[in-house]
Amino acid sequence: MAAMLAEIEAGEPEDIVPARPIPPKAPPGIGAALFKPYLLANLIASYPDFWYEVNSCAFRVGVARAGRGLIVNDPEAIRRILVSDAENFPKDDNQLAILKPLLGNGLLTAEGTTWRRNRRLAAPIFQHSSVRDFAPLLVRAAERSVRRSLEQQGIFRIDREMTKLTLEIIGEAVLSSNLDKDIDAISHTVTSTLDTFPAMFLASAFLPSTLRDRVIEAVVAPGRRKLDIFAHRIMSEAKSDGDETTLLRRLMAASESEEGHEMTFDQVRDEVATFLLAGHETTATTMTWVWYLLTLHPEWQDRLYEEVHGVTGGRPLTIDDVPALKYTRAVIDEALRLYPPVANLMRRAIKTVELTSDITVQRGESVLISPWLLHRHRRHWDQPDHFNPMRFLGDEAARRQRNIYIPFGGGPRICIGASFALLEAVLILGTFTQRARIKIINADRVMPQARIVLRPNVPLEAVVTPRNLDG
């Protein structure tokens, strides 16, 4: 293991920089935002160079009051906001104005009693012991995906295949539903809805709240109507299934015992929409970024094969193999660092709080914690724009400050499915590298764009080659 570690560290190329927007010297001013609103269409591209070095600074996007606030990159301040003082920093109204018209009052957007109830109901499904039970399902789905990929003749869409795979998984594991017949339609609905994000963001940056809400409602209405159709089918299938172990069945049964009636269609629909987006889109996009990064660094595909083959000898992966897949997990972690699923977290202070000796947030002020900025911050990371999975292993990982790596958020509102998503990604990547090599052929055209999820700007076209028995 030590020899392999030394070989990896010695062989890392330093001249390959994965795609990222070149930061401007200064943020777009009000005039630029008014007359060139396209500058804000990909928000991370508007972040100026100095934001990647400061602990905190004021920001202003657009002209609406909601577009002003404080950027925080300080680890201790972030801990206070997300963890110890989380009750003083609820989700920002402006961010909720974008999410709620599509996702309703689901786990991602709910507050107070509704959020606590549904979080409590969902927790048993996503606790460590329960997540382990999903491993056979995850491996079977990954093996089907590998077979489909190897059957491709010529160029195919690897991002589409990752979407199909993760939708299959979330349907079976969480939603009690076989989504196979709806996968293409759901994928198209999610993609087309995410593509409206620039319009929603510009509405939030330039319009007063009442008009903002009307515009955003109109923009997302087509996608919401389609998700309603999918939710109705999923709910009907879950009722007839009778499996009380899946999350959807638990949610549907909860109100009967607590309030004397089943959850309403709207309540179920909100959770279905949330898990269709947060439960599959984030992992599908993460895996798409993994294949992009492994195309830039093909030597890592071979290293992962050696690791997986050394553990399994060619048999299918099991849950007991996962702790030994250290390099596989490190690649996932590094992909999540470079391309966090959610680029920006917004909070609003309900009282004035002194976070550190030099950072005070005023009552009513918006706070931007950006995993995109934080994960590439020059004071926190060595060569932050480079792909280096080894930073998540050994001494470097042990020395890393807490709260500078938050791909799933943090505190009470940390993504409830984080453990599930990490296990899913590790088993997908390990299963693929056992049998195939993936190469993105349009990697030179890729650029990250911040929608609700951080996605590539173009479909990722790939070719697949089978591995020989000797790897």
Image (cartoon, rainbow, N blue to C red):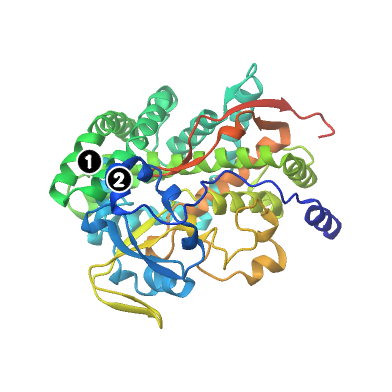
Residue 389: which numbered mark, if any? none
Residue 17 in the image, given as x and y percentages of width and height: 64, 47
Q: Amino acid at mark 2?
A: Phe
Q: Are dots 1 and 2 in contact, CB under 8 Å?
A: no
Vertically, is 5 above or below 187?
A: below
Identify the residue at the far top of this view: 153
Density class for disc 1 (Cα within 10 Å; few <14, some 14-19, many ≥20) is many
Q: Amino acid at mark 1?
A: Ile
Vertically, is 327 above or below 272?
A: below
Q: Which residue is mark 1?
A: 216
Left/right of residue 383 with respect to residue 448 in the rendered view: right
Density class for disc 2 (Cα within 10 Å; few <14, some 14-19, many ≥20) is many
Is any atom of residue 4 visible in this view?
A: yes
Q: Could you say which is closer to the camera, residue 89 or residue 105?
A: 89
Q: Quadrant of the C terminus?
A: top right
**Picture mark count:** 2
Q: Residue at x 26, y 77 (%)?
A: 352
Residue 392, quarter of picture: bottom right
Residue 201: which numbered mark, if any? 2
Left/right of residue 17 with respect to residue 231 in the rendered view: right
State the separation of the CA atoms marked 1 and 2: 9 Å
Residue 399, quarter of picture: bottom right
**Element type at mark 2:** helix
Q: Quadrant of the N terminus?
A: bottom right
Q: Could you say which is closer to the camera, residue 378 or residue 351?
A: 378
Q: Earlier in the sequence, mark 1 or mark 2?
A: 2
Residue 185 in the image, given as x and y percentages of width and height: 38, 24
Q: Residue at x 36, y 37 (%)?
A: 194
Vertically, is 153 above or below 426?
A: above
Is any atom of residue 103 visible in this view?
A: no
Residue 87 in the image, given as x and y percentages of width and height: 30, 70
